[in-house]
Image (cartoon, rainbow, N blue to C red):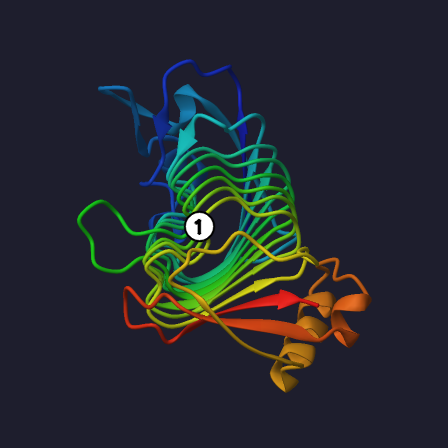
Amino acid sequence: MALTFTLQQALKIPLEVNSVNHAALSGQSIDQIRALPVLHGNRKLTVADFFDVQQSAKEEDLLVWSGDCSRVKYIGAGLTSGRIRVEGNAGMHLGAEMSGGEILVEGNVTDWIATEMKGGTLCVKGNAGNLLGAAYPGSKRGMNGGTILIHGNVGNEAGHRMRRGAIVIGGTSGDAIGFDMIAGSIFSFGKIGAQPGAGMRRGTIGLFGESNEPELLPTFKYSNVYRPTWLAFFLRELRSAGFPVPEDCFDSDYRKYSGDFLALGKGEILVRQ
């Protein structure tokens, strides 16, 4: 069963829809789904106050959010299985703490996306804001599994305190990607901001869009030039998933920098030669 939630009005105040998830919708009638609670500012209202809900038997386990949902928060939060498609923009905390399933956003997303994600796949065709796949304030770990694919640009501190999983960025990245990174992988195909990998302990940051010497912190040291065998396999899988990978990335050598030596120092930054 597929359900489509079409936003019927422009939102000035954020709307929280974390009560609308696959588990809550299972076995419910359309009228019961329309009566589910949502939070509009400090007012408790229902789904029917904001969305037209339609049911279709064409696709299984699919929720579609249609319209400009840039102020709709917590879409797909805690997702464990099934699929979500956002036909437009999405608001904060999209896919927060998700552990499985798939989320596809055809537009842009804002800050705090896939916070402390544990599994599944999140793909954004547009741009993302700050703190993608990051840890909540005071939390020791951010993203702990899964895959995030951003075709456009991202803001600052993507992958903050990430422990596992992969983040792939097609466009420009902001400052401090991989900040306090514990492990995992971040791959950027565009220009990057200042201080990538600041405080990283382990993990890999691949800079495929950089052909010149990047502005790394002095606590990173040049190691060697090589062509990682595993990287070609990863790039092929990425291309097969529909992500645009430049052909020269497959045949390039990569400069390796180790760091951050103010932390554990077992991380690596790979720069396309």
Q: What's the amino acid at mark 1?
A: Gln
User: In the rendered image of this protein, does residue 38 appear above or below residue 233?
Assistant: above
Camera-nearest residue between 272 and 160: 272
Q: Residues within 10 Å of mark 1 (few under 14, many from 20)?
A: some
Quadrant position of the C terminus in the picture: bottom right
Tell me which residue sits at (48%, 56%) in the image.
216
* Residue behind mark 1: 195
Which quadrant holds residue 86? top right
Circle 1 SS class: loop
The single residue placed furthest to the left in the displayed view is: 138
Picture layout, residue 23 above or below residue 265: above
Give the image location of residue 203, x and y in percent: 42, 71
In the image: residue 126, left or right of residue 117 = right
User: How many marks do you count on the picture?
Assistant: 1
Q: Position of residue 214 (x, y in %)?
A: 58, 55
Q: Position of residue 54 (x, y in %)?
A: 56, 35
In which image quadrant can residue 12 be found?
Answer: top left
265 horizontally vs 254: left or right: left
In the rendered view, does 179 fall on the left or right side of 231? left
Q: Residue at x 43, y 47 (%)?
A: 132
What residue appears at the point 79 percent right and 76 percent down from the top-left corner?
Answer: 251
Residue furthest to the right: 247
232 to 105, vertically: above or below: below
| Residue sitting nearer the eye, 220 or 131 | 220
* Residue 190 coordinates in the image, percent (x, y): 66, 50
